[in-house]
Image: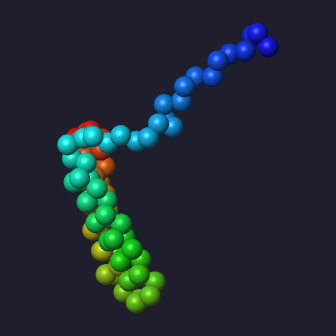
Amino acid sequence: MENEIPHPKRHNLEPFRDTGEARVLRLWLNIIFMVGAIVGLVLYFYFDERETAKWVILGSCVFKFVELVLRIMKK
């Protein structure tokens, strides 16, 4: 097969390198978001605190949006 086309190198398989100055801040924002989401789900499904759970989940989403903005700005 002499007409074989070489396969391009796939850069998306390389390990993720996050060297931005806000890396640690983004990590903590993600942790706060995940803990808040889990607490909100537990409140919603196990304690019948539906209104409180909604506010906890919405509050944790604020942390995720801040992290998203930092990631988009590549800080």
Quadrant where the N terminus is found in the figure: top right
Q: How many marks?
A: 0
| Front-lying residue, 10 or 39 | 10
Q: Is residue 34 positioned above or below 19 on the image?
A: below
Q: Please tell me which residue is depicted at 20% across the width and 43% down the height of the picture.
A: 21
Q: Is residue 8 above or below residue 71?
A: above
Residue at 23 percent of width and 53 percent of height: 24
Left or right? Give the position of 56 relative to 6: left
For the residue pair 45 and 31, the one nearer the viewer reads as 31
Give the percent coordinates (x, y) of residue 37. 37, 70
Residue that lies at the very extreme toward the right in this rendered image: 1
Q: Position of residue 4 (x, y in %)?
A: 73, 15
Quadrant for residue 18, please give it: top left
Q: Position of residue 11 (x, y in %)?
A: 48, 31
Quadrant assignment, res 58 = bottom left
Q: Quadrant of residue 47?
A: bottom left
Q: Residue drawn 36% across and 76% down? A: 40
